[in-house]
Amino acid sequence: MNNYQKEVYRQTIKDAIGTEKLTTFALRAGLSAGNLSRIRNGQPATPETLKKIADASAAVTYAELMEAAGYSGGLAAAPEEPPLRKMISVPHVRELKEPKTALKQDPTLKRSLVEESAVGPGDYIFFEVRDDALRKLSPGDTVLVDMAKEPADGDIVLLLLEGTEPLLRRVTKSGGKYLIYGDDLSRYPMTSADIGGVTVYGVVVRAITRP
C-alpha cells in the first residue's frame, strides 16, 4: 500500500457509508459490522473488501477507495469473480438397456449433480453395487461409471452378459475373449466370454461407500 493516508482513507470510507446505519450497510456489502467499523476507523482493507464496499455504495467508486487506501493510485483492477462451477446431471441407473444412450434418456431416473472439474470429461452414470465380488465394495454402495472410457486390463467395469443380471467385475482381454472375475477368485472365479457376447457399459472411476 503506497501513499496510504489514514485520515483521507477514513473519510472516504465514511463517505462511502454515508448516512446509512453501519449495520445495514455492512449487511448489504456482505461484511460483518465489526469489520466495517474497524475499517471506518482506519484499519486497512484488502482490495476484495474495498470492492464490496464500493458495490454497496452510491457515493464512492472502487477506484476512489483504492486510491485512498494507497493501492497503486487507485489503478489496481477489480478482483476477478471466481469462475462459475459447471455441474453435470448424472442419472442413477438400475437396469441396463441397449443402446447405452437410452440409459440417460429415462425421465423417471433419479439424478445427482456432480461438479465437472471433480470428475473430468466423460459420460457418466451411477450404479448400485449388488454383490461383494470386489474388495472395498459392498451391496448398496454406489459407483460412478464413465461410459466413454475404454477398459484397460484389470479395470472394474459395468457389463452385461447374455442372459445375466448386470455385473461389476474386473476384466482382461485375451485374444477374442474377455476374462471376467472378482477379487476373491475362490468365490468369484475367472470366466471367459467372447467379446461379442459381452456388452461393456463403462469403467468404474469412483466409489461412494456407505458409512
Image (cartoon, grey):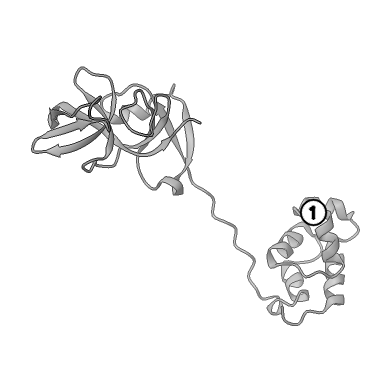
Residue 6, above or below 152: below
Quick one: 89 or 38, which is closer to the camera?
Answer: 38
Left or right of 166, for residue 179 = left
Counting from the top left corner in percent of width and height, residue 149 is at 28, 42
Q: Which residue is mark 1?
A: 32
Counting from the top left corner in percent of width and height, residue 96 is at 30, 24
Picture quadrant of residue 34: bottom right
Picture quadrant of residue 63: bottom right
Q: Image point 38% across, 31% down: which residue?
A: 137
- Report the number of numbered marks: 1
Q: Residue placed farthest to the front in the image?
A: 186
Residue type for callout 1: Ser
Q: Image point 75% across, 52% down: which residue?
A: 30
Q: Residue placed farthest to the bottom in the image?
A: 3
Quick one: 161 or 70, which is closer to the camera?
Answer: 161
Quick one: 158 or 15, which is closer to the camera?
Answer: 158
Counting from the top left corner in percent of width and height, residue 60 is at 79, 66
Label 1 neighbourhood size at 10 Å, few (<14), some (14-19), many (20+)?
some
SS for dot 1: loop
Q: Image point 40% across, 36% down: which residue?
A: 207
Picture quadrant of residue 127: top left
Q: The N terminus is located in which quarter?
A: bottom right
Residue 28, above or below 59: above
Counting from the top left corner in percent of width and height, residue 47 is at 69, 67
Q: Residue placed farthest to the top in the image?
A: 163
